[in-house]
Image (cartoon, grey):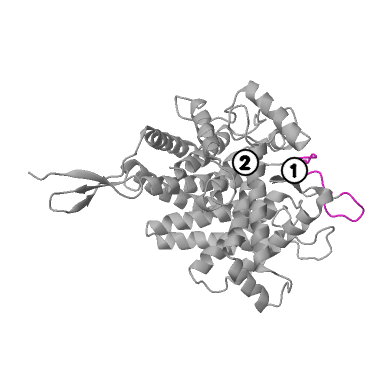
């Protein structure tokens, strides 16, 4: 009779070593109770998402499904042979087919510029998911959705090609694609164009695709726009909390005659408004630029642009900004009372006009800050905060269907956090409950589930 034993190999897998010295791969099994718990929670969260994801709201559907794709990718990486995780992969393929039909139902002209950013990023992750399954034809359709539709629309209809905007020219407006409303140059639409451009470029570069420099060009333009704003200390667009911590506000504002940055509506703005989602996406885009610094230097030199560009100084600046924002998140968006990651207490985020849009922010932030590449650059450890947040989300769910909720913290701890934020930031609103009463129930359920999946994905990546 063969003597056999299990030997630990990479990840959480095992291999069976027979007496003949033959290794036989075995199903990946969780290493400990916590990993097993995370896997069970992940499976339950996804099953609930399958029940609520198919709702009719263009941008929210794009964003929530991006959360799903990143989450499922993390689960597949950790448990590649688990039947229930593999079933998720197959389910996602069918969902993506439906999403393509959904996208094509809409007249792009009536949609807002940032909508294309969300769908473009989702399409990139959809392509990655489908290529792993060998579904190249469907993957190509999502590539074209990301590049020929989403990126091109933002470039042509939302990017400000003029040179006369003050105090900083160019940038991206968040208006409708038909141009009937120019919209405001808020952070979310600018970071979306930045991130979409940098992510497309990295894919195109890795796969040696032709005509890829136009994406690097736009990513660089968006970097310049943000950097120019960050240099204007008086406006505190990148607001410093300490020498090692800062956060980018949700809209650059400059009140003087001739300024193009004074609009307080679309959506309603208030002083000090900062949103979690912006922090994660900005770090993601800056991380991309760090990864392509060699290509950028070559491209700038070839095109006789920015003769003062210094690659070493550029890298140093990027790393500094990434760690500043990482420090800002750790300092100002984590509660000292319970260690949980929170949304900054700003009425503009929570209030009745756009609370249903900004509700997804905490998940979006951790979709990026929880990724290994960004996690290794931010200079702070959010591991225990991720774990505490996931635990809170799970414990406050509807136990009958595993539906996650808009709020998952206690009122007492929220009050402590609001005061903590006020002392650090200098301003805060006494608000902790999302005003989403007018939001369609299934839309709300889909968004809340996506926040939980984003956090779960970040936790799985820590294993």
Q: Quadrant of the C terminus?
A: top left
- Place residue 437 in its image quadrant: top right
Which residue is at the front of the view, 95 or 458?
A: 458
Q: Is residue 418 visible?
A: yes
User: Is residue 402 or residue 432 the one in the foreground?
Assistant: 432
Is residue 269 inside the magenta stretch? yes
Task: Identify the secondary structure beneath mark 2.
Answer: helix
Q: Residue at coordinates 82% horizontally, 47% vertically from top-left?
A: 263
Residue 198: percent from the left, percent from the top?
A: 60, 61
The local crowd at label 2, few if under 14, some if 14 to 19, many if 20 or more residues have their Cα within 10 Å, is many
Q: How far apart are marks 2 and 1 (CA)?
A: 15 Å
Q: Is residue 235 left or right of residue 126?
A: right
Residue 412, label in figure: none
Which residue occupies 65% across, 31% down? Answer: 436
**Residue sitting nearer the eye, 191 or 3:** 3
Rendering coords of residue 178 (x, y %): 71, 57
Q: Residue 361 carries which label?
A: 2
Q: Main secondary structure of the magenta part?
A: loop
> Magenta residues, as a range?
255-272
What is the residue that sits farthest to the right in this orientation?
Answer: 257
Residue 112 in view here: no
Q: Name the residue under label 1.
A: 267
Residue 297: within the magenta? Answer: no
x and y percentages locating residue 284 in the rendered image: 59, 53
């Amino acid at each position: 009779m063969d003597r056999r034993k299990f030997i630990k190999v990479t990840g959480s897998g095992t291999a069976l070593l027979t007496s003949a010295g033959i290794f036989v791969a075995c199903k990946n099994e969780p290493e400990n109770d916590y990993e097993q718990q995370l896997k069970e929670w992940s499976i339950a969260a996804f099953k609930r998402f399958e029940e609520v994801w198919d709702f009719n709201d263009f941008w929210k559907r794009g964003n929530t499904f991006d959360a799903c794709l990143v989450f499922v990718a993390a689960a597949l990486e950790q448990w590649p042979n688990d039947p229930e995780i593999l079933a998720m992969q197959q389910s996602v393929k069918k969902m993506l087919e439906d999403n393509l039909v959904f996208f094509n139902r809409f007249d792009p002209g009536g949609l807002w510029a940032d909508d294309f950013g969300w769908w473009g990023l989702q399409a990139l992750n959809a392509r990655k998911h489908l290529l792993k399954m060998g579904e190249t034809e469907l993957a190509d359709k999502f590539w074209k959705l990301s590049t020929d539709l989403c990126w091109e629309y933002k470039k042509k209809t939302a990017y400000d090609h003029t040179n006369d905007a003050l105090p900083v020219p160019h940038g991206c407006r968040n208006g409708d694609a038909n141009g009937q409303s120019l919209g405001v140059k808020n952070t979310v639409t600018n970071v979306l164009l930045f991130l979409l451009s940098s992510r497309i470029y990295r894919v195109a570069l890795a796969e040696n695709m032709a005509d890829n420099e136009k994406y690097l060009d736009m990513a660089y333009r968006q970097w310049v726009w943000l950097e120019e704003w960050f240099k204007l200390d008086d406006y505190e667009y990148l607001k410093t909390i300490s020498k090692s911590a800062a956060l980018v506000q949700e809209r650059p504002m400059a009140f003087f005659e001739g300024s193009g940055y004074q609009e307080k509506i679309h959506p309603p703005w208030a002083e000090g408004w900062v949103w979690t989602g912006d922090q994660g996406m900005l770090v993601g885009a800056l991380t991309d630029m760090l990864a392509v610094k060699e290509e950028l230097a070559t491209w700038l030199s070839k095109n006789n642009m920015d003769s003062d560009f210094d690659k070493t100084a550029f890298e140093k600046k990027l790393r500094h900004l990434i760690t500043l924002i990482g420090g800002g998140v750790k300092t100002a968006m984590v509660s000292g009372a319970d260690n949980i990651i929170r949304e900054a207490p700003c009425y503009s985020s929570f209030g009745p006009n756009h609370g249903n849009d900004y509700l997804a922010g905490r998940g979006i932030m951790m979709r990026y800050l929880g990724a290994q590449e960004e996690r290794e650059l931010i200079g702070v450890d959010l591991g225990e905060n991720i774990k505490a947040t996931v635990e809170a989300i799970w414990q406050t769910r509807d136990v009958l269907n595993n539906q996650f909720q808009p709020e998952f913290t206690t009122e007492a701890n929220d009050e402590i956090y609001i005061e903590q934020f006020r002392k650090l930031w200098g301003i805060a609103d006494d608000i902790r409950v999302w005003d989403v009463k007018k939001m369609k129930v299934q839309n709300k359920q889909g968004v809340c589930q996506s926040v939980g999946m984003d956090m779960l994905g970040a936790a799985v990546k820590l294993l």
